[in-house]
């Protein structure tokens, strides 16, 4: 489905205050108060070889620090009150934390405070419900509040301009931040968060919050507050969205498109929760030299978007292209509780999920550490995420491996378990994923091993170890029930050139309806070894002054035979796991010349600061200064593409952690 264009303006645009120079039809995110700019802050997480089923920590504050040259280092809060964030849920998603109205100027760093005192962290160890971990600091101490200072690239600083919106992207590096000890049931945490004025990835972005001030039918726009992460907190700004005539909606369980969907949205009251999914784009804006200019004149850009001709200064403005809007009880409330997760088993009209999430009607968000049982019936309504019109969906569409949001009446979780009666409710089915090794290739078909064999991380379905699933009843007969070791995928016209036998592959799409396999899965997208994000993780224990054989403006030669190399030393490519200690040559890390964005970081475990760079040369120059023979490197991670034949790793992101 093509991306659908949304046009964002601030709620303040309606007031036409003195400094607002644009008409209501302007593309982009504008200042939330006259003469200010807008800082749109997003948060995502980068996966680890340790799959976290939940990683819930307190997010106490997110402060943007004004550059000293601007106003003496003044700090501005992007999060009005503390909340909770499940970082495991952000591995495949980027969430808008807030859209804060800030004085124009440069901002040098972001100060983020996390609270681990009541953290819930569960890792997928292959058992049914995973392993609960106790977070500890580098010396084994109990963790409470932890502060991270994210120093932004001085050569590509984060700048806010009057009446413009600037995007600040934050990324919590799970691998670089956490070392799991299964035997001790602990996770050693040294949080590392990178930040950039450029997008750090191409993940889908979610904006969540209440309808604010109703729907403006004259301009076909609606205003949303921002309440991120599915946890209660104060609103972090508000945005006005002008959808196109092909926007898809799901409102109170009803799917629709365009004008019909907008009409249904307009009937909702202020305060009803809504969500929009899509991507940010950035564009340069032409400026006037008059910072107080007020005009309604516009120009039409090459892509047909109407934009203002008079703005305060030359800068970059961000806009949002969305594919789906949910609202009303399709998000939260209206008497419904919601249980979300991956279906691990089905027997008749009873669904089972492990490690699911319960979002109660009153907004309470709970992790179900045991088993969630969902009861459905022939009266349960079925929707498919992104479907733009009502379909003849049946409950059989829900099968083992389905990602679902089930709406009904929940019991209070007891001993880690919960039940949800959705027999008179509804279920929304979303795209899920399967990751494994190719064992056979046909015309428009693949067979994957999800179970795991030598040289493999255990395969996954829906991001979970395959041991969690019971495929009984998935096939037309017991003899053809889905098999983890021979998982049959229909790929249609997807390119299978690099999906060769023995190669790791990730597919996304829908599992086959219950009782109708084979095939077991219909893929709508496919990643192969040339497109799956590879991750290199090497620890150096207490640290080493020489983690690299060489490192210069061209490449980094990681010393894989260094005597300080710790328990983690691998390159993971989807389901494939390469132990670097067995390589005949050192991995060579270079900046990826084809990556849309590059981000490099130096983390400091004692000071809690992280230096960020968008230019590889600047990163290397600073690293050469800091690795002075006394300071020790404790770890290196990289994300990108790995070519085994040349031991080369083309990285879009590199982090090095130092012990100071």
Image (cartoon, rainbow, N blue to C red):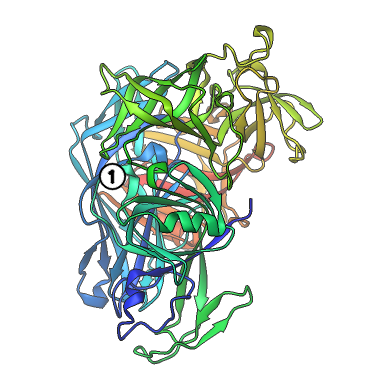
Q: Residue at x 61, y 75 (%)?
A: 304
Residue 381: x %, y % from top left: 50, 32
Whether residue 262 is visible to the viewer of this picture, yes or no, is: yes
Residue 115: x %, y % from top left: 21, 41
Total marks placed = 1
Would you place residue 174 above or below residue 411 in this image?
Answer: below
Whether residue 50 is visible to the viewer of this picture, yes or no, is: no
Would you place residue 415 above or below residue 141 in this image?
Answer: above
Left or right side of 147 for 543: right
Which residue is nearer to you in this view: 116 or 447? Answer: 447
Which residue is nearer to you in this view: 105 or 261? Answer: 261
Would you place residue 142 above or below residue 587 in this image?
Answer: above
- On the image, which quarter does residue 169 sit in? bottom left
Name the residue that disc number 1 marks.
Answer: 605
Would you place residue 617 above or below residue 325 in this image?
Answer: below
Which residue is nearer to you in this view: 217 or 633? Answer: 217
Which residue is nearer to you in this view: 280 or 358? Answer: 358
Q: Residue at x 51, y 38 (%)?
A: 536
Q: Residue at x 58, y 19 (%)?
A: 452
Residue 139: x %, y % from top left: 22, 32
- On the image, which quarter does residue 54 sit in? top left
Left or right side of 541 for 279: right
Residue 516: x %, y % from top left: 66, 20
Label 1, secondary structure: give it.
loop
- Mark 1, Cα crowd under 10 Å, few <14 / some 14-19 / many 20+, is many
**Residue at the farthest right position:** 443
Left or right side of 656 for 443: right
């Amino acid at each position: 489905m093509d991306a659908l264009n949304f046009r964002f303006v601030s709620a303040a645009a309606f007031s036409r205050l003195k400094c607002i120079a644009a008409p209501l039809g302007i593309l982009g995110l504008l200042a939330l108060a006259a003469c200010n700019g807008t800082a749109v802050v997003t948060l995502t997480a980068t996966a680890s070889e340790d799959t976290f089923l939940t990683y819930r920590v307190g997010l106490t504050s997110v402060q943007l620090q004004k550059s000293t040259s601007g106003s003496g280092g003044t700090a501005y809060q992007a999060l009005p009150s503390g909340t909770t964030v499940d970082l495991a849920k952000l591995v495949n998603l980027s969430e808008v934390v807030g859209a804060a109205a800030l004085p124009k100027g440069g901002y040098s760093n972001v100060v983020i405070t996390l609270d681990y005192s009541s953290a819930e962290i569960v890792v997928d160890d292959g058992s049914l419900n995973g392993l609960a971990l106790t977070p500890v600091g580098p010396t084994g101490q109990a963790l409470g509040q932890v502060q991270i200072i994210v120093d932004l690239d001085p050569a590509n600083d984060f700048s806010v301009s009057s009446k413009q919106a600037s995007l600040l992207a934050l990324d919590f590096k799970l691998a670089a931040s956490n070392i799991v000890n299964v035997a001790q049931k602990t996770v050693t945490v040294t949080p590392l968060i990178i930040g950039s004025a450029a997008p750090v990835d191409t993940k889908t972005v979610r904006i969540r919050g209440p309808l604010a001030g109703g729907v403006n039918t004259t301009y076909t726009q609606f205003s949303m507050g921002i309440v991120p992460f599915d946890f209660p907190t104060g609103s972090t700004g508000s945005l006005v969205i002008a959808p196109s005539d092909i926007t898809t909606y799901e409102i109170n369980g009803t799917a629709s498109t365009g004008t019909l969907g907008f009409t249904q949205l307009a009937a909702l009251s202020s305060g009803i929760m809504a969500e929009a999914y899509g991507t940010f784009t950035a564009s340069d804006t032409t400026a006037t030299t008059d910072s107080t200019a007020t005009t309604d004149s516009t120009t039409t850009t090459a892509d047909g978007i109407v934009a203002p001709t008079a703005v305060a200064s030359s800068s970059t403005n961000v806009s949002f292209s969305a594919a789906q809007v949910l609202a009303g009880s399709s998000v939260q409330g209206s008497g419904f509780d919601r249980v979300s997760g991956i279906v691990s088993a089905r027997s008749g009209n009873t669904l089972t999920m492990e490690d699911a999430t319960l979002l109660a009607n009153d907004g309470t968000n709970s992790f179900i550490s045991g088993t969630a049982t969902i009861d459905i019936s022939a009266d349960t309504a079925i929707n498919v995420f992104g479907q733009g019109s009502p379909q003849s969906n049946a409950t059989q569409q829900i099968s083992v491996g389905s990602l679902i949001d089930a709406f009904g009446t929940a019991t209070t979780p007891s001993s880690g378990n919960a039940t949800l009666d959705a027999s008179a409710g509804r279920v929304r089915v979303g795209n899920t994923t399967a990751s494994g090794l190719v064992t056979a290739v046909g015309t428009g078909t693949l067979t994957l091993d999800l179970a795991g064999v030598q040289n493999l991380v255990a395969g996954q379905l829906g991001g979970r170890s395959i041991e969690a699933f019971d495929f009984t009843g998935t096939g037309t007969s017991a003899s053809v029930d889905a098999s983890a070791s021979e998982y049959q995928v229909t790929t249609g016209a997807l390119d299978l050139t690099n999906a060769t036998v023995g190669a790791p592959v990730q597919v996304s799409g829908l599992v086959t309806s219950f009782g109708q396999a084979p095939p077991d899965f219909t893929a709508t997208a496919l990643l192969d070894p040339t497109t799956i994000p590879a991750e290199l993780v090497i620890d150096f224990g207490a640290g080493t002054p020489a983690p690299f054989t060489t490192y210069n403006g061209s490449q980094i030669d990681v010393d894989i035979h260094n005597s300080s190399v710790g328990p983690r030393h691998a390159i993971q490519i989807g389901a494939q796991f390469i132990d670097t200690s067995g390589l005949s040559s050192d991995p060579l890390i270079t900046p990826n010349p084809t990556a849309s964005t590059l981000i490099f970081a130096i983390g400091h475990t004692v000071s809690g600061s992280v230096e960020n760079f968008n230019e590889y040369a600047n990163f290397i120059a600073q690293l050469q200064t800091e690795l002075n023979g006394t300071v020790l490197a404790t770890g290196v991670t990289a994300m990108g593409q790995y070519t085994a034949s040349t031991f080369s790793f083309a990285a879009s992101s590199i982090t090095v952690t130092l012990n100071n």
